[in-house]
């Protein structure tokens, strides 16, 4: 069954996500306007600045359109800024967001850029074989609601979660050569179609 | 300096408490370039105080450049332009959640050390400040914080990347409100990238020699057809149309220096330029956001500047 995965292309590392989908042989397209959304079966919210992406989403009506599709079951995967946009609560912030996942996130939880890092990290669906997790001024999940499954933790901090059709990681698999998390997301998209 | 720490964690896999030894690595090349990747498709704005930084953040800037004076004022006032007062940088850092960048003088690695200690997210080794060394740039590999540098052509860009720059930008001619030099520099860089990409392999060493560029980076461009690090534009962007033009020419994001806070309505202009970078392919959106922005910053004819007033020629 052929599916098309959209990548929100308002700002951020959306081309890196497209490169991952390209390597997996999955059709993909950039989403900048509400009309672009109609052609996609799933959507990736890339890394970038969550305040910038949130503001543009609200200004061009994408927030309502994405919320509607997500509530109708469309799978969404957010990395870093994308995770922040998916959260229902952002600690100390009133910024524009989608507010779909029952999680509370803390922005810049590790400090400024000199504290950014990479580390091998277990990701629950893959068992013992770790992924290389690249954290860039990354957020963490401070608390989760009912029905949210924790997929990865780093030093007791929650950094990957799933709630039904919604997937989020505080780190960036798109900056590595490991396509497994994107494959996992494509699997969710196939199931939902 | 490269930092390695080894710690242990509990893996949540299968709900078991198995211990995994693993290595945390900071300041890797991937982590440095990674932040530049996150800034793509965005606007980095020059600000001189906390209030301007908040205006920039609200308008949708992806980062701010913390300065004491914007380039237009540096140009007007003359004298030696140095790194900003750390107090100003700290105030700006506290005012926003987006990344904060700051400038050091070309070759002034002590200023760079101070900026790293302040926890800035990116250092711009910038020709806008008065150079401290007329022969050498900072050895950027020696720092944990990533650097951005300016370039007029591909050879200059690859020399800076060879020294460890994790992001490049055109120099343009800062503080003029005139886009002509940024266009010249971006066209030159993209032209040489295309030339290397299509050249036969046996001509690459000669090209590296002509460009005075590291050979391995020339080989990388030959293979990938793109600059090894994100390629941004700066120096003279004053309108949404200027920003869109640079995106069309190959820029992956833009820096706006004096263009916002030297205009008559900084809030509106800042938002309009942010929208223009995202929707640079959509003329209807560009037309809409360009309406009624008030006066742009006063412009300067670059051809009428004296040789010693040009900033773009600084850098080696």
Image (cartoon, coloured by chain):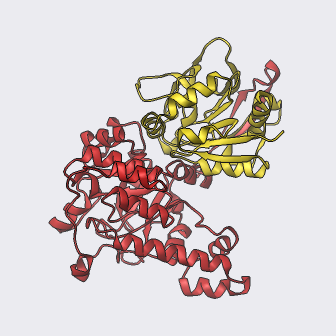
In front of the other: A40 or B217:
A40
Q: In the rendering, at what x and y percent does residue B97 appear?
A: 40, 36
Quadrant housing residue B92: top left
Horizontal and vertical percent for residue A154? 65, 29
Whether residue A39 is visible, yes or no, is yes
Q: Colour of chain A?
A: yellow
Quadrant of the rendering where the N terminus of chain B is positioned? bottom right
Q: Please give left or right for residue B19 compared with residue B151 in the image.
A: right
- Chain B rendering hue: red
- The residue furthest left is B77
Residue A45 visible at all: no
Q: Nearer the viewer, residue B206 or B244?
A: B244
Write the residue at 41% across / 23% down. A92
Look at the picture and state if B259 lies above or below B171.
above
Question: Which residue is pictured at 40% across the width and 78% down the height?
Answer: B135
Q: Position of residue B300 (x, y in %)?
A: 22, 71
Hey, which quadrant is residue B307 in on the image? bottom left
Q: Residue furthest top?
A: A146
Task: Give left or right: position of B225 versus B21.
Answer: left
* Apparent side of residue B85 relative to residue B143 in the rendered image (left or right): left
Between B23 and A6, the one lying in front of the other is A6
* In the depicted structure, whether residue B31 falls above or below residue A135: below
State the quadrant of the C terminus of chain B: bottom left
Q: What residue do we see at 32% from left, 70% from top? A: B173
* Whole-percent x, y for residue A148 in the image: 67, 17
Q: Is residue A99 above or below residue A51?
A: above
- Residue B59 lies left or right of residue A5; in this view the side is left
């Amino acid at each position: 069954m052929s599916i098309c995965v959209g990548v929100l292309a308002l700002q951020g590392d959306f081309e890196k996500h497209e490169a991952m989908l390209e390597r997996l042989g999955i059709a993909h397209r950039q989403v900048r306007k509400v009309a672009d959304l109609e052609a996609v079966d799933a959507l990736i919210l890339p890394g970038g600045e969550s305040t910038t992406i949130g503001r543009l989403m609200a200004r061009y009506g994408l927030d309502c359109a994405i919320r509607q599709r997500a509530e109708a079951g469309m799978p969404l995967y957010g990395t870093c800024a994308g995770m922040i946009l998916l959260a229902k609560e952002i600690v100390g912030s009133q910024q524009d967001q989608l507010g779909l996942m029952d999680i509370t996130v803390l922005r810049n939880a590790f400090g400024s850029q000199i504290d950014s890092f990479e580390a091998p990290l277990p990701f629950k669906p893959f068992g013992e074989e770790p992924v290389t997790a690249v954290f860039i001024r990354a957020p963490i999940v401070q608390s989760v609601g009912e029905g949210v499954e924790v997929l990865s933790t780093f030093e007791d901090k929650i950094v990957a979660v799933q709630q039904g059709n919604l997937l989020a990681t505080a780190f960036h698999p798109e900056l590595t050569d490991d396509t497994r998390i994107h494959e996992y997301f494509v699997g969710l998209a196939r199931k939902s179609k | 300096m490269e930092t390695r720490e080894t710690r242990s964690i509990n893996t949540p896999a299968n709900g078991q408490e198995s211990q995994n030894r693993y290595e945390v690595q900071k300041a890797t090349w991937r982590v440095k370039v990674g932040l530049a990747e996150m800034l793509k498709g965005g606007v980095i704005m020059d600000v001189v105080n906390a209030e301007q930084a908040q205006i920039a953040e609200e308008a949708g800037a992806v980062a701010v450049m913390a300065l004491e004076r914007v380039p237009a004022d540096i140009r007007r006032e003359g004298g030696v332009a140095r790194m900003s007062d750390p107090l100003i940088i700290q105030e700006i850092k506290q005012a926003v959640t987006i990344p904060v960048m700051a400038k050091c003088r070309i070759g002034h690695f002590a200023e760079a050390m101070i900026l790293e200690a302040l926890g800035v997210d990116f250092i711009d080794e910038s020709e806008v400040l008065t150079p401290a060394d007329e022969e050498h740039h900072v050895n950027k590999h020696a720092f944990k914080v990533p650097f951005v540098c300016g370039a007029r052509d591909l050879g200059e860009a690859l020399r800076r990347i060879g020294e460890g720059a994790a992001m490049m930008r055109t120099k343009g001619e800062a503080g003029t409100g005139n886009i002509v030099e940024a266009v010249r520099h971006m066209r030159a860089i993209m032209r040489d990238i295309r030339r290397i990409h299509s050249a036969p392999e046996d001509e690459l060493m000669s090209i590296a020699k002509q460009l005075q560029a590291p050979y391995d980076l020339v080989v990388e461009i030959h293979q990938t057809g793109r600059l090894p690090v994100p390629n941004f534009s700066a120096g003279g962007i004053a309108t949404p149309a200027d920003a869109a033009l640079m995106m069309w020419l190959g820029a992956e994001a833009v820096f706006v220096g004096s263009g916002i806070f030297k205009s008559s309505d900084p809030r509106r202009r800042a938002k309009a330029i942010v929208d223009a970078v995202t929707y640079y392919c959509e003329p209807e959106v560009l037309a809409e956001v360009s309406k009624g922005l008030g006066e742009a910053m006063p412009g300067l004819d670059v051809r009428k500047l004296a040789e010693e007033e040009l900033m773009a020629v600084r850098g080696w």
